[in-house]
Image (cartoon, grey):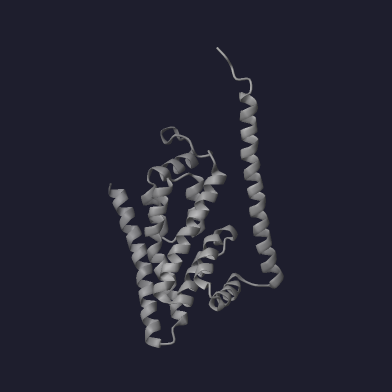
Amino acid sequence: METDVHAPQQTLADSLWKHGTKFSAGLFWLALLGGYAWYMRSTGLSAQEAALQLRDFLAESAWGPLLYILLYTLRPLIFFPATIMTAMSGYLYGPLLGTGYALIGGNLSGSLAYFVGRFFGGDLFNQDDAEASGFVARYAANLRRNGFESVLIMRLIYLPYDLVNYLCGFVRVPWIQYATATLLGVLPGSLTFTLLGSVLQSESGSQRWLLAGFSLAMLLLGLGLSRWLKARRAAG
């Protein structure tokens, strides 16, 4: 019976390559975050002030919507608040187009953060669900088993957007379940903050009250749906 004398070397090389790639990607990410932090500190800008600068830039650009979607997609790499980007879309493009652009950007940014989390998580939580032991491993296994419903509830109760994105990738929630639940679950939140941004843009007092009312209704709808889903899960 022949043995492959090169197998240990190949395994070691693969391991070094995998960990070296993650280390390099981590350094790049830290450099990106450091550059953003340095820029904010050197200019003395808050996140809100940076958003106003970005809003003015997008409003003056003929490529505004495409740039907005691109920047929204890349946003999780520097943890720029998703709520500000969503409200900005309503302010710039109105409630209809703004919601559409925010949904596209939000779902793309969610997928980017998911795959970044999955890349860094690797095989850490790839244990068979039936063999999972320990609180963290059991939580990860439960999240994978009930991926669609769990992600949907987390979206509807407005948990921090990027936290959910990275967490789901890190514990390897099936992407189809994650993406589908995100697509549905961000609808109320996107409408809430897009309409809120449209309120700031509107010049009519009655229109502002109408948009604010719809924004509040979407907020309550999302919370109500989350309570219904959790009650159904408990009953089942």
The answer to which image quadrant residue 217 occupies is bottom left
Q: Position of residue 143 (x, y in %)?
A: 42, 45
- Which residue is at the front of the view, 61 or 42? 61
Q: Residue furthest right?
A: 42
Image vertical order of residue 217 relative to residue 230, above or below: below
- Which residue is at the front of the view, 39 or 5? 5
Image vertical order of residue 48 relative to residue 236, above or below: below
The answer to which image quadrant residue 76 occupies is bottom right
Q: Position of residue 193 (x, y in %)?
A: 44, 70
Q: Write the residue at 42% across / 43% down.
A: 144
Q: Position of residue 130 (x, y in %)?
A: 41, 33
Q: Residue furthest front?
A: 62
Q: As drawn, is 94 to the left or to the right of 118? A: left
Q: As drawn, is 130 to the left or to the right of 24? A: left
Q: As drawn, is 214 to the left or to the right of 33? A: left
Q: Residue furthest top?
A: 1
**Image quadrant in which the N terminus is located:** top right
Q: Write the residue at 36% across / 80% down.
A: 210
The answer to which image quadrant residue 182 occupies is bottom left
Q: Position of residue 66 (x, y in %)?
A: 51, 68
Q: As drawn, is 154 to the left or to the right of 112? A: left
Q: Is residue 160 visible?
A: no
Q: Give the total of numbered labels.
A: 0
Q: Write the residue at 34% across / 53% down.
A: 230
Q: Is residue 208 visible?
A: yes
